[in-house]
């Protein structure tokens, strides 16, 4: 078995394409992709925040103070229009044609004296389908004026500051969380960690799996291997461990790369937060996370090897394996849903139980008794799949179909 394992590993190391996808791609491309997405997202938000917006005001004569304050705002440029308030079609066309970014319609009933007029309602016309900061910028101006009008009304009524707060917020609920930083951060990102690790393990194992089974069929080297004195179950296990090793290596290299790049590119409090968070997770929890991945990787390796053995060609094997990604994603997404906890039947569902357990370990709220059904279910399924893989490999009509 180990002779076959060493043979497959040597072939794996000689294959530059496989090494690229296993090591170079995770080290360089994935961080570049994530960093690029973050960079361009930040640029898009920054552009939306700093862009000078064109606007039109209809009914400005009813609110001269408000109109003047909006006009004083640096990142807003006013466009004059002859449209009337009742011409809603024309107002919408003005925005749709991108002549302006928004139109503010002020009613004739507008007044700064809220004691007499009550609440003022302004109509804001804008295209709210994309990323824009229209309402946020406009609210800065309107909120300031609204606060001035409100304070003036309270002074007129002779209401002091304490009573003002009570009138504006009659009941205030003060939130006191019992969760520490680790639990809070773990709840937010804990569901993403198993998602990333599972997919990376699967993707990292796919390419070697295709080459070890279907690839050997195409090259004609499978027959030579079969006539060797090594028992077929040892051949299968050697190939199986090669696929599992490749999957784990790819996942660990990628996670390590993302962590290192994240620390390098982060600054100040971000590094302190990461250090504090990682330091709160004990070595035992890390070992348990890795231990739970062992049967998961075994499941992936057995399924991939079975598919590769069955396939006639490299291309056919890839076609069989691609839908497997979507099958793996489903239980992981279910584990991220609110209300789904590591208890009852969920502790026995493969993949979902490990995803939930990793999340609980990251949060520091793990019930270690739940490890029993997790290891029992995943190990049993992995054992059944490995047995099936050996049986599959022993069938001549499968190998040479």
Image (cartoon, rainbow, N blue to C red):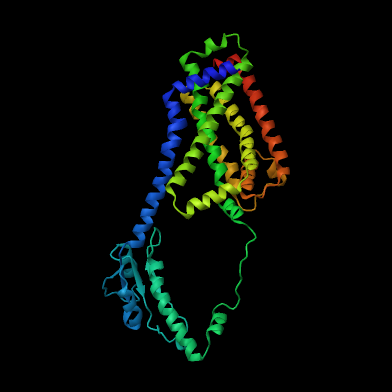
Residue 219 is left or right of residue 278, and the answer is: left
Query: Residue sitting at 35 percent across and 83 percent down?
Result: 62
Query: Residue sitting at 56 percent across and 47 percent down?
Result: 278
- Above or below 370: residue 301: above
Is residue 321 in view from this perspective?
Answer: no
- Give how far across and how far down residue 25 sits, in percent: 43, 34
Q: Quadrant of the C terminus?
A: top right
In depth, the one of 320 and 22 nearer the eye is 22
Query: Residue sitting at 69 percent across and 36 percent down?
Result: 375
- Give how far across and how far down residue 48 sits, in percent: 35, 60
Is residue 44 in view from this perspective?
Answer: yes
In depth, the one of 362 and 146 nearer the eye is 362
- Above or below 158: residue 88: above
Q: How many numbered marks appear?
A: 0
- Above or below 63: residue 273: above
Query: Residue sitting at 36 percent across and 79 percent down?
Result: 66
Residue 91 is left or right of residue 257, and the answer is: left
- Give how far across and how far down residue 197 sits, in percent: 54, 39
Q: Quadrant of the N terminus?
A: top right
Residue 70 is left or right of residue 378, and the answer is: left
- Give how far across and how far down residue 83 sits, in percent: 29, 74
């Amino acid at each position: 078995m180990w002779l076959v394992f060493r043979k497959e590993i040597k072939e794996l190391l000689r294959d530059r394409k496989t090494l690229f996808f296993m090591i170079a791609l995770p080290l360089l491309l994935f961080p570049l992709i994530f960093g690029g997405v973050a960079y361009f997202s930040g640029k898009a938000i920054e552009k939306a925040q700093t862009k000078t917006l064109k606007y039109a005001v209809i009914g400005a004569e009813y609110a001269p103070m408000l109109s003047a304050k909006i006009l004083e705002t640096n990142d807003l440029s006013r466009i004059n229009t002859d449209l009337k308030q009742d011409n809603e079609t024309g107002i919408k066309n003005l925005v749709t044609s991108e002549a302006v970014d928004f139109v503010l319609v002020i009613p004739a009933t507008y007044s700064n004296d809220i004691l007499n007029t009550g609440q003022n309602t302004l109509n804001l016309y804008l295209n709210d389908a994309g990323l824009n900061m229209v309402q946020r910028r406009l609210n800065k101006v309107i909120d300031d004026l609204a606060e001035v009008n409100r304070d003036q009304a309270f002074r007129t009524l002779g209401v002091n500051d304490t009573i003002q707060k009570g009138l504006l917020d009659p009941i205030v609920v003060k939130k006191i969380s019992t969760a520490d930083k680790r639990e809070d951060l773990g709840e937010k990102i804990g569901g993403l960690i198993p998602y990333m690790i599972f997919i990376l393990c699967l993707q990292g194992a796919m390419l070697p799996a295709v080459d070890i089974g279907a690839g050997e069929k195409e090259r004609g080297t499978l027959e030579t291997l079969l006539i060797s004195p090594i028992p077929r179950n040892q051949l299968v296990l050697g190939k199986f461990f090669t696929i599992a090793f490749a999957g784990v290596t790819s996942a660990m290299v990628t996670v390590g790369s993302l962590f290192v790049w994240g620390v390098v590119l982060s600054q100040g409090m971000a590094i302190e937060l990461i250090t504090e968070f990682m330091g709160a997770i004990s070595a035992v929890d890390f070992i348990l996370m890795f231990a739970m991945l062992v049967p998961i990787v075994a499941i992936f390796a057995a399924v991939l090897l079975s598919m590769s053995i069955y396939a006639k060609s490299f291309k056919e094997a890839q076609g069989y394996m691609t839908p497997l990604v979507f099958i793996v994603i489903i239980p992981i997404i279910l584990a991220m849903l609110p209300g789904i906890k590591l208890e009852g039947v969920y502790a026995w569902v493969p993949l979902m139980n490990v995803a939930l357990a990793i999340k609980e370990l990251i949060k520091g709220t793990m019930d270690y008794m739940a490890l029993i059904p997790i290891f029992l279910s995943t190990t049993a399924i992995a054992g059944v799949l490995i047995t099936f893989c050996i049986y599959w490999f022993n069938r001549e009509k499968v190998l040479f179909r």
